[in-house]
Image: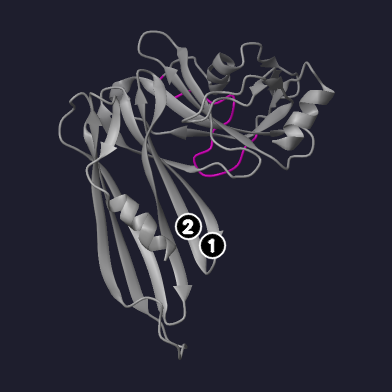
Amino acid sequence: MKSLRRGARRLAAGALALLASFAGAGAAEIGDPAPGLAGVTYFDLVKLLIPDLAPDGRGGASGSLLLPRRSLDMPGAKSQNPVIAAPRAISPLDLPASGRQLAFVVELAPAQGADDTSAILELVDVQREIRLLDAVQLNDETSNPPKIAVLGELAERAPLLALTSERTAAGGRIATTELAFVRDGRFAPLGGFSTLSESGCGFRRSQSAEIRPTGTPSPYRAVEVRIVNRVAAAEGCRDKPKLRPGEKSYATTFVWSRAAQRFQPSNSDLVLLERDNRR
């Protein structure tokens, strides 16, 4: 993103170059038809975010875009700069069809010197007319965009998303999962947790997570999170292992609070998980 901002300073009236060739599983091209919409392409949907989007005569398109956008839990910066960038991919999300909404990630890279990327998650309403509902920035110059999974819906037009990012840690990896949902046409945070995989002297540890909506909407379904911590013995170490072999579970349920107007955990298990993982 630093190179994006440098480009913005060099060109005050920046443009966004949209290339028509992408690679990767599940990726779509800018000219591909939007699912379930006759005569509508992803070009039309990206144009909702970039109103002056126009073909560039080279198989792509261009238009001005302001960065940074707002993040999932933070408002956008007060000073925004137009930048020159190019999408590396459009990745559609498989939202429940009953909501009549479309969501996809546009991954942008600088038009020159593609070192930093910025991924924008876009939400489009197709219930009555095609209109942009929300757009959030998923990463900055210090991080890669998260992987996104759709885990059902908490109510009509309220899909549940899990955004997971990974980073290396001493002897292993940490996966941080942020749960989000659509509330009144905007992406909203729900809760989160981190899981740890590591190897050490005499042990191997792995943690797996299960997430599922449960119950009936009131106005939203609850979300159950269960994380299983498994420790296995490993050979090749003469010292006493840091962890003993065994299995332990952490489980909580996020329930909508009408008073607080947000989801709240039913217990402190995820706090205990965080504490145990720091040992």
Residue at the outermost bottom position: 238
Q: Give the left or right position of residue 29, taking residue 62 as reference.
A: left
Where is the N terminus found, in terms of image quarters?
A: top right
Let me know if residue 247 is in the magenta part.
no
Residue beneath disc 1: 169
Q: Give the left or right position of residue 89, taking residue 178 as reference.
A: right
Secondary structure under the numbered disc 2 in the rendered image: strand
Residue at the outermost right position: 10
Q: Which residues are magenta?
A: 21-36
Magenta stretch: helix, strand or loop mostly: loop
Quick check: marks 2 and 1 in contact, CB under 8 Å?
yes
Camera-side residue: 22 or 148?
148
Where is the C terminus found, in terms of image quarters?
A: bottom left
Instruction: Check disc 2 and give the amino acid type.
Output: Ile
Classify 256 as above or below 57. below
Q: Position of residue 122 (x, y in %)?
A: 50, 25
Q: Position of residue 179 (x, y in %)?
A: 37, 39
Camera-side residue: 272 or 201?
272
Camera-side residue: 244 or 205?
244
Camera-side residue: 7 or 242?
242
Q: Which quadrant of the structure image shows residue 31?
A: top right
Q: Is residue 96 visible?
A: no
Residue beneath disc 2: 174
How would you rate the neighbour count of disc 2 (Cα within 10 Å): few for under 14, some for 14-19, many for 20 or more? Answer: some
Classify 202 as above or below 116. below
Residue shown at 38%/21% (left/top)?
A: 101
How would you rate the neighbour count of disc 1 (Cα within 10 Å): few for under 14, some for 14-19, many for 20 or more? Answer: few
